[in-house]
Amino acid sequence: MDSNKDEAERCIKIALNAITNNDQEKARRFLEKAQRLFPTDKAKDILESLAQNGKPPNENGNHVNGDGPRMRHRGHEEEPKASAQGATESKSYTAEQLEAVRKIKGCKDYYQILGVEKSASEEDLKKAYRKLALKFHPDKNHAPGATEAFKAIGNAYAVLSNAEKRRQYDQYGEERSHPSRHRRDFEADISPEDLFNMFFGGGFPSSNVHVYRNGRMHFAHHNRQERREQQRDGGLALFFQLMPVLILIIVSALSQLMVTQPPYSLSYHPSTGHIHKRHTTHLKVPFFVGDRFNEEFSGNNLKNVERSVEEDYISNLRNNCWKEKQQREGLLYRARYFGDSDLYKKAQKMATPSCSRLSDIQNILDG
């Protein structure tokens, strides 16, 4: 299901963010949850790399050092980025936009960034975010630092709109005062661009805000280039060159055996063996299991698995319901802002199936 896939991708993003902050336990927890929701090779590769050396694949790739051809290739690779950055900075901007960016970057806390009081309601936060997000989106504001200001605005709203994160933020104050203890508590679980798209229905392209670079492919490219240049050294050199590759293959195979597959998936996924459909006893939630599930799980073990299935399913519904509401509110806001009656009617008719299903489940639990 697409909803499971979206939620799995969100879990992977949270896991990568946790890895950046050296919280491998949280990263493993969200990667395993992503595999249960919608198994992917990406999450599997990251889990294997963490089990092998405690680092994600892209981090291993980016740490390639050396000189000669590899260093020259890195320099060539950075040239287009510099050119693209120069083209972006050459776009015109007003003095007011530049001053607004400086003001945001000079703010000391999230409330000041959004321009609201500490007693601000959820609706106050939404209004402030909508206004600032449109004003500072990098595709509309080309002043230097607009991207950083846009990210700061998104992070401020994502933290303050979360009741638990807001409570911790109010309790501990600025994260700069507690860099090691509370830093992870004040980070958003969603990227600024994804948050913007949920509010405004994908009104702008996302090319200027975040770029994902596959470090593993980058590393492989360097190795292939290096092999081509060293073939002239003869068979012995080729043997020594291939030996690290063979070692990597062996280590990868061993680490793959150490990574246990989750016993279930919320979606049909033949590549991991989750092909047999079942339903939980209480809420009748559908899930998929492998061939030996009936042999390995029974009694209390089966109850624990079904409880975990229902918790993941409800968590998935809550997140999707929140997205559906934000998309609907974003369209309504755009319709009022631009006076578009057709868009307003479309927003009013927009269905929220995850919210409806969540309401049905809540009635079952209450009943």
Image (cartoon, rainbow, N blue to C red):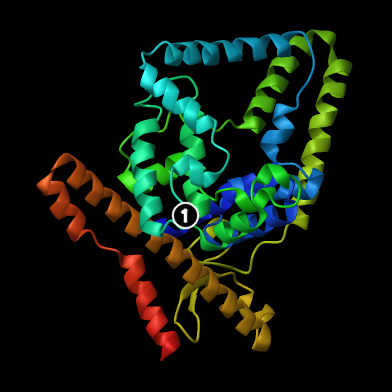
Residue 186 visible in the current orientation: yes
- The correct choice, above or below, for 218 with respect to 32 in the image is above
- Judge left or right: residue 283 versus residue 219: left
Residue at the image position 80 percent from the left and 50 percent from the top:
254
Residue 317, position as x, y percentages in the image: 43, 66
Q: Place residue 106 in its image quadrant.
A: top right
Q: Position of residue 85 (x, y in %)?
A: 49, 15
State the residue lying farthest toward the left.
341
For residue 210, say whether it is visible: no
* Above or below: residue 137 compared with residue 331: above
Q: Nearer the viewer, residue 2 or 317?
A: 317
Residue 30 location (% of width, % of height): 62, 57
**Which residue lies at the image location 50% right of the left edge and 36% below the top edge?**
151
Residue furthest to the bottom: 367
Image label count: 1
Q: Residue at x 56, y 56 (%)?
A: 39
Q: Residue at x 55, y 57 (%)?
A: 166
Q: Nearer the viewer, residue 41 or 159?
A: 159
SS class, disc 1: helix
Residue at mark 1: 5
